[in-house]
C-alpha cells in the first residue's frame, strides 16, 4: 500500500497513459507534496526529532600531498557523524612502507591490524568504513597484496615475453612521422632516417608522448609495393603533427619455419659484378660515396653523379636507391657527370636522397655499398634463385670446347650457331660488357621470329622443376625461352613453360630462372632460346641446366618461434676491416640489420683460404651451433692457391676442399649459404698480376665449382669412359644417365681435286662403349655443312653402333661428329 494517493511520475508526466499531451494538475501536485511532508515528519519523530539520510559513497581524493604512510585526501562530501553509515574509497599514489594513517586517523586492515609494508600499492583503489577511532578496509589486505604481487608477476612475465619476442623476432626502433603525409622510418646508426622497407611488423608504443598504446601499423615496401602486404596489421588511432617513437617487433607467436640444410648458392660473378673486377685505371683505396645529383625514375638508362670523376666506363657502380635497396650497374659510358648504365635502373633515385659509390674499393675488396647489396640479396631475395639440384640435373651444359656438353645446341629455323671461346673483355673494348662469361659460348644469329637454337632432347624429370640459363642479347628486341615436352622424336610436343624477356634487360649476361612443372606423361624435354624479332638479332648462351626443384619463393632465413643463429665464416669479406676504414664494411654488418630477428655472428678471418677455413672449423664454427652459415672464400685462393700453383691443380684442389667444407657444415645441422667466387681485378701490381689473370682464375673457380658442387651434392659425379671410337660421360643415380660425343677425327676425307673433298658415303660405324636401355637420341653434324642424318644400327651389350647416312661434299676439309643421349644399363 502506497503512502501517496498518486505517484509522482503520474502527476508530473507530460503525457497521459494513451500518450496524449497533458498539463500538470496543480491540485494533484499539492496533494502529493502534503503527503510527502507528513511522511518525513513521521520518520523524524521516530528518530528523536532529527533525520540523517545515508550517503551511498564518499570518495577521498588523494593528490599525493601527503606521504605513502601518512595519506592526506579530501572527501567529496562531509562525513556522517554516525560511524559505519557511509561507504568510503581512497586512491593510492605510492606503495606504503609501514602503518598507514588517512588525514591523521589510522587506516587498518579488514581484521583491524596495521597494514603491512606493500599492502597498499600505487595505482590501487580501496573501499573502507569510518569506525570512529580508525578507518577499516573492506578488502582483505593480505589477499590484496597476494593479488597485487601475482598481477605484478604476470605483468613482468608479459613484459619479459614481449622483450623476448623483441629479441627472438627482432625489435627495431622506428619513428612515426605524423602530419599531412604519414610515414614510418627507421633510425640508422648515423641518426638519419630511412624508409621501413618490405616488412610487416606489430608495433607497441614505448614513448610517453604516444596517444595510443599499443597499436598496429602497415609497413609497406616503399618504392616496391604500393599496397600493404597480405595479412598486414592496420594502424589504429589518429596522430597529430609531430614525431613519435615506437618499438617495432614481428609477431611473437609465429609458426616455426621448416629448416632444410640443403645448400644455397649466391652467384655473384655475373649477378653481382657483371663479370668485371676493378679496372687498372681506377685509383684504389679511395672513398667515392656521393649523392645522386638529378632525380631518375626506375627504368631509366643512367644516373647522374655529383662528381663523376671516380666512375670510369667499363667499371661498375653500386647505387643506394630511394627505397634503401642497393644494386650494382655496369658503366657503359659517361657524359659529363651522367653515367650511362646497364641494366636500367631498378628503382627510383631522387636527387639528394639516393647515393652511389664505386663498386670496388681496392683490387681485392668491394666497397661498403656492394657488401650491403650482397647482404640484402641473402636476406630478402627468394630462396628459389639460390637453389641447387638436390637430386641431380636432368640436363646441364656449359658448352665446353670438348666433352659431353659441347655442341648441344642445334639451330632452329634459318638461324646459325657458332661457338666462341671464353674472353675477358668482350670484343676487346673495356667499356663493352663481357660476353663469354662462363666458358665457351654459343652465338646464335637470328633474322626472323622464332629462329634460334635448342638443346638435344633429354629425359624429363618429375614434378616441380627449374630451368636456369645464362643469356645475353646484343640487340634490344625481345627473346623467348621455351621448354618443350614430348615423347622422343618430337611427337605430341607441347609447351611445358615459356618466358618472354626484353632485350633491354639482357644487355649484360644474366642468370634467368624459369620454374615449371614437368608433365607426368612427358618422356623427354628440350629447351629453346628463340628470337621474337623479324630483324637481325644475336643471342649469346653460356650455360643451360634443368633440375627438379622445390625451393621456396620466400627468403632463405625466416623468423620462427626461436631465434635463428646466422654465422659468417670466411675471409676478410666476412670479417671486414671497419676499424681501418668504413669502406671495408663486413657482409655481416648489413646482414645483422636485415635480420633483426636473428642472432648474427661474425666468424670471419682476413686472409683465409678454403684450407684455412677447414683447419679452424672445429674450433671457430662448430661450437657456435649455427642454423645458417654464410660461407665466403675464393679471393685468397685466386691470389695464392692452396695447391701451390694455379695450373694444373688449383681448380681441383679448390673444388674438393669446398665440397668437403660444405659437407662438414651440413654435418653439424646447419644450412650452408655459399657465396660464389667474385670477379677480380684487371691487375694487382703489388701481387704481380696483370692482364686480367686474377679475373680469369676467379671465372674458372666459379664455372667449375658450380658445376661440380651441384653434381657432388646430389651423387651425380661424372664418370668418363673412353673407347676406341669416342668417349662417354655417365652419371650415377639419375634418370639422364648417358651423354656421349664421338671424336670424328678418325673419319678421314678423300680429296677429289680442286672441286673439294668428299666424305665416304658409308663411313665406318662408330661404336660407343656403353650399352643403352632403348634407342638413344642421336644427332650428327659436319663442321662445314648442315646437320646430317644419323641412325642407330644396333645396340649390344658392348655398346651402341651409329652410322651417318648420305655422302657430304665440300670444298673445305672438315670432320663429322655425332652425339647420343639416352639411358645406360
Image: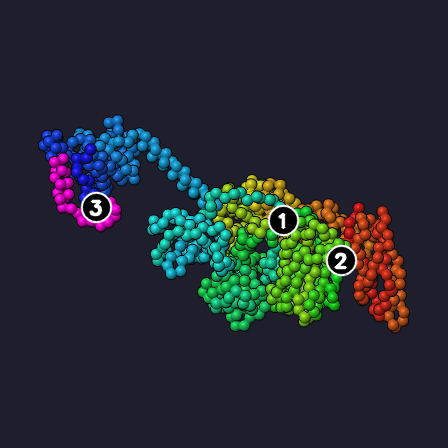
Q: Is residue 494 visible to the viewer in this orientation of the structure? A: yes
Q: Is residue 649 visible to the viewer in this orientation of the structure? A: no
Point out the tag, 2 or 3, that comes first from the N-terminus: 3
The quarter holding residue 805 reads bottom right
Find residue 554 and report its horizontal and vertical position in percent.
56, 51
Report the quarter where the N terminus lies.
top left
Rendered position, 20 above or below 316: above
Dot 3 alpha-carbon crowd within 10 angstroms: few under 14, some 14 to 19, many 20 or more: few
Point out the tag, 2 or 1, that comes first from the N-terminus: 2
Q: Which residues are magenta?
A: 17-39
Viewer-proximal residue among 685 and 210:
210
Q: Which mark is residue 550?
A: 1
Viewer-proximal residue among 495 and 819:
495
Q: State the separation of the CA atoms marked 3 and 1.
A: 79 Å
| Residue at 63% in and 54% down | 515
Rendered position, 457 above or below 120: below
Find residue 119 and report its horizontal and vertical position in percent.
29, 32
Give the left or right position of residue 120, taking residue 787 as reference: left
Label 3 with label 1: CB-CB less than 8 Å: no
Front of the two marks 2 and 3:
3
The kind of secondary structure the magenta stretch mainly shows is helix
Q: Secondary structure at mark 1?
A: loop
User: To which residue does mark 2 refer?
Assistant: 490
Q: Secondary structure at mark 3?
A: loop
User: To which residue does mark 3 refer?
Assistant: 13
Give the left or right position of residue 156, taking residue 309 as reference: left
Amino acid at each position: 500500500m502506497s503512502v501517496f494517493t498518486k505517484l509522482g511520475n503520474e502527476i508530473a508526466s507530460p503525457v497521459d497513459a494513451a500518450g496524449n499531451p497533458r498539463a500538470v494538475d496543480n491540485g494533484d501536485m499539492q496533494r502529493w507534496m502534503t503527503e510527502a511532508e507528513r511522511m518525513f515528519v513521521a520518520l523524524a519523530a521516530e528518530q528523536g526529532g532529527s533525520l540523517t539520510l545515508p550517503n551511498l559513497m564518499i570518495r577521498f581524493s588523494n593528490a599525493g600531498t601527503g606521504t605513502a604512510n601518512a595519506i592526506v585526501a579530501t572527501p567529496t562530501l562531509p562525513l556522517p557523524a554516525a560511524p559505519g553509515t557511509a561507504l568510503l574509497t581512497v586512491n593510492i599514489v605510492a606503495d606504503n612502507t609501514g602503518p598507514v594513517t588517512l588525514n591523521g586517523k589510522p587506516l587498518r586492515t579488514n581484521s583491524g591490524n596495521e597494514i603491512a609494508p606493500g599492502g597498499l600499492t600505487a595505482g590501487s583503489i580501496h573501499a573502507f568504513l569510518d569506525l570512529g577511532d580508525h578507518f577499516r578496509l573492506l578488502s582483505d589486505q593480505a589477499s590484496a597484496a597476494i593479488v597485487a604481487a601475482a598481477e605484478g608477476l604476470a605483468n613482468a612475465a608479459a613484459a619479459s615475453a614481449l622483450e623476448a619476442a623483441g629479441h627472438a623476432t627482432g625489435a627495431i626502433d622506428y619513428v612515426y612521422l605524423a602530419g599531412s603525409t604519414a610515414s614510418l622510418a627507421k633510425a640508422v646508426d648515423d641518426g638519419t632516417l630511412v624508409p621501413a622497407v618490405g616488412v610487416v611488423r606489430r608495433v607497441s608504443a614505448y614513448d610517453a608522448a604516444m596517444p595510443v598504446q599499443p597499436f598496429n601499423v602497415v609497413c609497406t615496401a616503399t618504392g616496391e609495393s604500393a599496397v600493404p602486404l597480405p595479412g598486414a596489421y592496420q594502424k589504429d588511432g589518429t596522430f597529430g603533427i609531430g614525431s613519435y617513437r615506437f618499438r617495432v617487433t614481428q609477431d611473437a607467436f609465429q609458426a616455426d619455419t621448416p629448416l632444410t640444410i640443403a645448400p644455397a648458392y649466391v652467384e655473384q660473378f655475373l649477378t653481382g659484378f657483371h663479370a668485371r673486377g676493378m679496372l687498372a685505371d681506377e685509383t684504389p683505396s679511395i672513398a667515392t660515396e656521393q649523392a645522386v645529383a638529378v632525380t631518375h625514375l626506375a627504368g631509366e638508362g643512367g644516373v647522374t653523379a655529383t662528381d663523376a670523376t671516380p666512375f670510369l666506363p667499363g667499371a661498375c657502380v653500386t647505387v643506394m636507391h630511394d627505397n634503401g635497396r642497393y644494386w650494382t650497374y655496369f658503366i657503359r659510358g659517361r657524359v659529363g657527370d651522367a653515367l650511362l648504365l646497364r641494366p636500367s635502373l631498378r628503382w627510383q633515385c631522387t636527387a639528394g636522397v639516393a647515393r652511389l659509390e664505386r663498386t670496388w674499393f681496392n683490387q681485392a675488396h668491394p666497397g661498403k655499398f656492394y657488401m650491403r647489396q650482397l647482404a640484402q640479396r641473402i636476406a630478402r631475395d627468394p630462396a628459389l634463385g639460390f637453389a641447387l639440384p638436390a637430386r641431380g640435373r636432368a640436363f646441364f651444359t656449359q658448352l665446353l670446347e670438348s666433352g659431353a656438353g659441347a655442341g648441344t645446341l642445334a639451330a632452329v629455323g634459318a638461324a646459325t650457331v657458332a661457338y666462341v671461346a671464353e674472353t675477358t673483355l668482350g670484343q676487346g673494348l673495356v667499356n663493352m660488357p663481357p660476353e663469354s662469361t662462363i666458358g665457351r659460348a654459343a652465338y646464335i644469329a637470328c633474322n626472323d621470329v622464332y629462329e634460334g637454337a635448342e638443346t638435344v632432347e633429354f629425359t624429363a624429370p618429375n614434378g616441380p622443376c627449374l630451368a636456369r640459363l645464362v643469356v645475353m642479347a646484343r640487340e634490344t628486341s625481345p627473346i623467348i625461352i621455351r621448354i618443350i615436352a614430348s615423347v622422343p622424336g618430337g611427337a605430341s610436343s607441347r609447351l611445358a613453360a615459356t618466358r618472354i624477356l626484353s632485350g633491354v634487360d639482357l644487355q649484360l649476361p644474366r642468370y634467368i630462372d624459369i620454374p615449371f612443372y614437368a608433365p607426368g606423361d612427358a618422356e623427354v624435354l628440350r629447351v629453346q632460346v628463340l628470337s621474337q624479332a623479324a630483324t637481325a638479332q644475336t643471342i649469346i648462351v653460356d650455360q643451360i641446366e634443368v633440375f627438379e626443384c622445390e625451393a621456396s619463393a620466400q627468403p632463405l632465413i625466416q623468423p620462427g618461434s626461436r631465434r635463428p643463429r646466422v654465422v659468417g665464416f670466411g675471409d676478410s669479406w666476412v670479417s671486414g676491416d671497419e676499424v681501418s676504414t668504413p669502406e671495408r664494411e663486413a657482409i655481416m654488418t648489413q646482414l645483422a640489420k636485415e635480420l633483426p630477428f636473428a642472432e648474427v655472428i661474425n666468424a670471419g678471418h682476413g686472409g683465409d683460404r678454403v684450407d684455412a677455413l677447414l683447419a679452424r672449423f672445429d674450433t671457430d664454427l662448430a661450437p657456435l651451433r649455427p642454423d645458417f652459415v654464410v660461407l665466403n672464400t675464393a679471393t685468397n685462393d685466386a691470389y695464392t692457391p692452396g695447391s701451390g700453383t694455379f695450373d694444373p691443380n688449383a681448380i681441383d684442389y679448390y673444388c674438393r676442399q669446398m665440397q668437403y667444407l660444405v659437407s662438414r657444415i651440413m654435418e653439424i645441422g646447419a644450412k650452408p649459404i655459399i657465396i660464389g667466387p667474385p670477379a677480380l681485378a684487371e691487375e694487382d701490381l703489388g701481387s704481380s698480376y696483370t692482364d686480367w689473370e686474377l679475373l680469369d682464375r676467379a671465372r674458372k673457380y666459379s664455372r667449375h665449382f658450380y658445376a661440380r658442387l651441384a653434381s657432388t651434392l646430389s651423387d651425380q659425379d661424372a664418370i668418363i669412359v673412353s673407347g676406341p671410337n669416342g668417349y662417354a660421360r655417365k652419371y650415377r643415380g639419375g634418370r639422364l644417365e648417358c651423354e656421349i660425343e664421338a671424336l670424328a677425327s678418325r673419319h678421314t676425307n678423300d680429296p677429289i681435286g680442286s672441286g673439294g673433298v668428299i666424305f665416304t658415303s658409308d663411313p665406318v660405324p662408330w661404336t660407343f662403349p656403353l650399352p643403352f636401355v632403348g634407342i638413344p637420341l642421336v644427332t650428327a653434324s659436319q663442321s662445314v655443312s648442315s646437320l646430317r642424318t644419323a641412325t642407330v644400327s644396333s645396340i649390344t651389350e658392348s655398346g651402341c653402333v651409329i652410322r651417318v647416312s648420305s655422302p657430304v661434299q665440300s670444298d673445305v676439309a672438315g670432320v663429322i661428329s655425332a652425339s647420343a643421349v639416352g639411358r645406360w644399363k
